[in-house]
Amino acid sequence: MTDSHLSNSEDYSEDSSESGSSEASEDAPPPPIPVIIANWYLNENLVIGSIFKATHLHTRQVVALKVQYVNHECPTNRYERHFYPLLQGGIGMPRLFASGVEGAWDYLAIDLLGPSLDNLYRKSGKETMDLRSVCSIAIQVIGRLQFMHHRGVLHRDIQLGNCVIGLPPNDKVIYMIDFGFSKRYIDPYTNRHIPDSKVKRDFIGNYWFSSVNVHCRGKVPSRRDDLEAAALMFIHLLTPRGLSWTRNGVPKTTEAHDRLKAEKRKATPEMLCRGLPSEFEEFLAYTRRLQFKECPDYAHWIERFRNLAKEEGYQDVDKFIWPPPVPVVPTVKSMNTPLRARTPALPRDEMEGILNGLGKLNLGTQAVLGDRTNVQAAIEKAKEDAKIDSTRLDGKAGTGKGEVIIISSDSESGAIAPLRRQAAPKAIRLNRLAGQASSATDNATLARLVKEFTDVLQMNSSRTLTKEAFYFLDVLYKQLDDPSVFVRTTRRYAISSPGQTSWALQAYVSWNRTSRQHSFNEQVPEKEPARVKLGVVARLRQEVGKCQSNKALAALVSDFAKVTNKSTGRTVTKDGFAFLEGLSERLKVLQ
């Protein structure tokens, strides 16, 4: 076969003179496959009727022997053998050891490889494949296509059955196989890209993942179509029960095929990738924006999927590991975590030494706890100390600053210890955070304020959302939903003492009256059962990491505030704090 045939491999019909067989012989059924074909002994059938595990009679080399009847209506072996020399030396590209025609059988001796991704996916029994595995598949498959396209070859039959893993020690490498539908897109005589055509062509490829341009519009395939097919394959693995048009099996009639094409044509990237990481939607949209002769940016998308896996906590994602490793979820430690959970356990021998030391401890003679003879003397001394402290404090009076201070007189020298400012009460700190949120101009600032908000809520044992906390959520919601509708307060916070009403609350009241939206801190007719809040907050905790915009985060903040307001006690649960921490982390990502 000449190179000109390879550049137009859609036409599989050949003259009878070239095939060397008569019309009568083409219609005859194929004879039984022999046990030995050209020094290869066929051990076992790997794929029914076409691929065998074979051993060379002299060298004992074990290969996969791909056997095809010479008069087959689609003689893919005849075309496939010409592509292996172009692809030799690439990672994930099988080697061709021998090929030829023996009697009525056309054979290819290639690398013996492991199971296909389709086999692994089906045998797992799960509706979807895990994200780490799909990211690894995306990284490797895009890399394989980059190599093939660099050698001037299109695959044109991207599917799970044509992606297989190697045998040890290459069991973490994904191989591309089955080049029977492949085509050279660089003309070997002119070294130019093949031309586009508006003439509708017959469909060559697979029903599930072929691109819309090739499958539904009959256009000439190019590099963009290989990548679009790969994108659909990745999305299929992450979609429960797969892509919608794959669920009814291979179409048996023209009407069924037309319905499948119509469903594929109307499926937008947004529809297909709902609930998936944004990288998959963006990758599919990117492949559909590419021009016919445009070279894709393979390295960019390999890095995008690698970074996605790293953001989800996966390591060494360039290797495809099956079964997938169990993800190590880091323990979230907060103020709610018991001390025993935050402190690493002591070794057994060290703990034994501590217990033995306690057993040998001699406390000596101790005073009786019930002895009250010195109680009166201690009371008198405490009164005298209090008088001395009050006398010293009079010298500091009249400053007019109204600060809350702590006076300590327990120094050994008897001198007054330096004055230190007491931490501001929770309500004042919440009001200040709300004021800072109202003037925030980027997500990084909002992420920091949400983190501080979470810390302030946990600064004491109370977990109740007060009106100041709801004020912060009101401001945060309006900043996330639409910063332009938020009315900034013009008064600054002048807090003279904890008992005095702050300007922030006065501004909040006037702002709440003029705002176009109601505050989350409003009276509800009746409280909801606790199980309702637990279910909603658990859902919010899971969804916050998948949001792709500030508006989506605003909707979650609204749900969190409303369900907390309707619950008895308006307390924040552990899932609630986890949601707030996840909100802070997501805001950092969405900068």
Image (cartoon, rainbow, N blue to C red):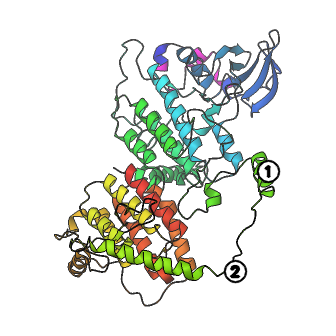
Q: Position of residue 123 (x, y in %)?
A: 71, 46
407 sits to left or right of 352:
left
User: Which contiguous range is marked in magenta?
Assistant: 6-24
Element under disc 1: helix
Question: Which residue is located at x 35 percent, y 76 percent?
Answer: 390
Question: Which residue is located at x 46 percent, y 55 percent?
Answer: 546
The image shows residue 270, relative to residue 335, as above or below, that is: above
401 sits to left or right of 476:
left
Residue at which label 1 appears: 352
Report if residue 29 is visible in the image: yes
Q: Earlier in the sequence, mark 1 or mark 2?
A: 1
Report if residue 430 is visible in the image: no
Disc 1 marks which amino acid? Glu
Residue at which label 2 appears: 370
Q: Position of residue 18 (x, y in %)?
A: 58, 15
Question: Residue lying furthest bottom in this view?
Answer: 525
Question: Residue lying furthest left in this view?
Answer: 490
Q: Position of residue 488 (x, y in %)?
A: 20, 68
Of 352 and 504, nearer the camera is 352
Per the picture, the main secondary structure of the magenta-coloured stretch is: loop
Disc 2 marks which amino acid? Gly
Q: Are marks 1 and 2 in contact (CB under 8 Å)?
A: no
Q: Position of residue 502 (x, y in %)?
A: 25, 76
The image shows residue 282, relative to residue 174, as above or below, that is: below
Of 420 and 16, nearer the camera is 420
Determine the CA span between mark 1 and mark 2: 34 Å
The quadrant where residue 530 appears = bottom right
